[in-house]
Amino acid sequence: MYSSFDPQLPKPIAFSGWKHHLGFISYACRSLAGECPPGSLARQCQEIGGSVIDLYYGKLTPICIATQIVDEVLRLGVSTKGLYNDWVLGSAQGYRMLTLSDSSVWVLRLGRFKERYIHIHPARYSPSCLRVRATTLKTLIAYLMQNGIVCEQSCIEEVNTIRQTLLNLPPLTKGVLNHRFFTLAKYVNR
C-alpha cells in the first residue's frame, strides 16, 4: 500500500501521494476500504512519519504534477542527475521551488533513490495546500480505510476509537469540531 514514492510516476520523480496528495489518498482509501486488516493499516500509517506535512488538495493529479515538473527541469537544462544535483545544491537553501499551472508551489530536493533523484513535495503554505500534523493525516487515512467515506458529521466517538485502537493516539477533545481532521473531511468530500 504505502511506498516512499509512486512507481507509476515518470522517472526521475520521487513523490509520495500517501503523504502529500489528498485526492490520491481519498481515491486509494476508498478503493481499499474494508480490505486492509487493522494491524496492517496501523503499520502503513506509521510509515507516514511524524511532525507536520504539507498536503496538496488541488485539481492536478500526481501524474500531471510530475509531468509538469519533468517538463520544467528539461526546459531549465538540468535533467541529468549530475546537473540536477548541482542545480539544487547551488541554491542557498539546498532545494529549489517551482510553480505549476494551478499556481501551486512545489519543493524540489535531492532524492535518495538511484533512478528517482528528483524528490518533490508541496511547498509550505502553497496555494491549494494545507499544513497538517502527521497524526491528523494518519487519522484520516485510517478512518477512510475503515469506513470508505468521511463527512463533517462523522461521529467523534468513531474518530477517537480509530485514533486510540488502531493508531495508539490520544482522543480528540478540545475544540474538536474545529480540528483539522474535519477540515480535511470537507476537502475529501468536494
Image: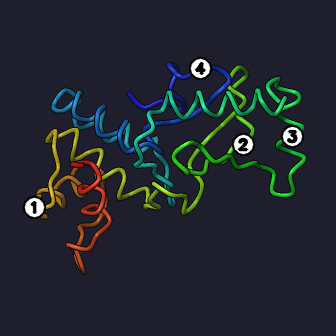
Amino acid beneath label 4: Pro
> Residue at label 1?
153
Name the image quarter holding residue 36: top left
> Residue at label 3?
87
Left or right: 98 with respect to 55?
A: right
Task: Name the disc covering residue 10, or none.
Answer: 4
Amino acid beneath label 2: Arg
Mark closest to the chain's N terminus, 2 or 1: 2
Mark closest to the chain's N terminus, 2 or 3: 3
Distance from label 2 to label 4 (Cα)? 16 Å
Mark closest to the chain's N terminus, 1 or 3: 3
Tags 2 and 1 in contact by the CB under 8 Å rule?
no
Mark closest to the chain's N terminus, 3 or 4: 4
Q: Residue at x 69, y 43 (%)?
A: 108
Q: Residue at x 51, y 60 (%)?
A: 51
Q: Residue at x 48, y 30 (%)?
A: 3
Task: Name the disc covering residue 109, or none.
Answer: 2
**Mark 2 secondary-structure assignment:** strand
Amino acid beneath label 3: Trp
Judged by depth in the image, the label closer to the viewer, 1 or 3, is: 3
